[in-house]
Amino acid sequence: MAEKMVSLGVTLNGVKQVQKSLKQFQPTLQKKLQRRATRKAAKPVLDTARARVPEKTGKLRKNLKLRSVKRKRGSTVVGVSVKTPERHVLGISESDPYYYPSVIEYGSAKRNISPRPYLRPALDQNKNNVRQIYASELKSLITETARQLQAGAITEKGVKVKS
């Protein structure tokens, strides 16, 4: 049975200066820096989602994770998502048609369960913070990486050079 996935997206505007600075690096290093900044920016969303999720056993709260978004080969899109755990981690049978993280988020008309969203409000609450953290983290990563490149501490692909 396929899991229902909650997809949350944030479009970042106003970071064009930072993005231009990023273009000075090799594409692999660009993606690496973007991934690190995106992960750090998404952390408050994860923390808020964990705080908002109703707790019965604590398994859902404990097992919410940040995961890299799979991308197509050659794509420049970098992202992370808050991922709910798989059925076996939560103790849900494969034959059970209900995946309770989705039922909590969206409710269930068949079972007369009202929605108690935890993922969407977590994003809404942190949207501006995510943009700010992303831009400042990317800016500091660019500065630090440029310094390391000049010092010869890393290669153009971001691999540390052995001393």
Image (cartoon, rainbow, N blue to C red):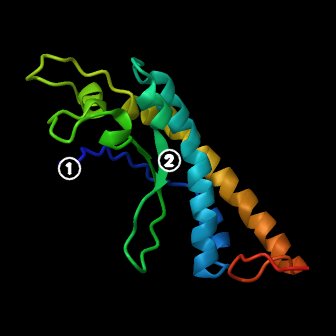
Task: Give coordinates of residue 113: x percent, y percent.
Answer: 18, 17
Q: Callout 2, which amino acid?
A: Leu
The tag on residue 77 is none
Residue 20 x/y as whole percent: 62, 71
Q: Is residue 78 above or below residue 87?
A: below
Q: Which of these two is toward me, 71 or 92?
A: 92
Place of residue 142 in the rendered image (x, y in percent of width and height, measured from the top left): 73, 66
Residue carrying label 1: 2
Label whose residue precedes the other's in the sequence (1 or 2): 1
- Residue 44, relative to residue 39: is it above or below? above
- Which label was assigned to residue 66? 2
Residue appearing at x 68%, y 53% in the figure: 137
Q: Nearer the viewer, residue 13 or 47?
A: 47
Q: Amino acid at mark 1?
A: Ala
Vertical side of 126 occupied by 53: above or below = above
- Give the residue at x 21% y 17%: 114
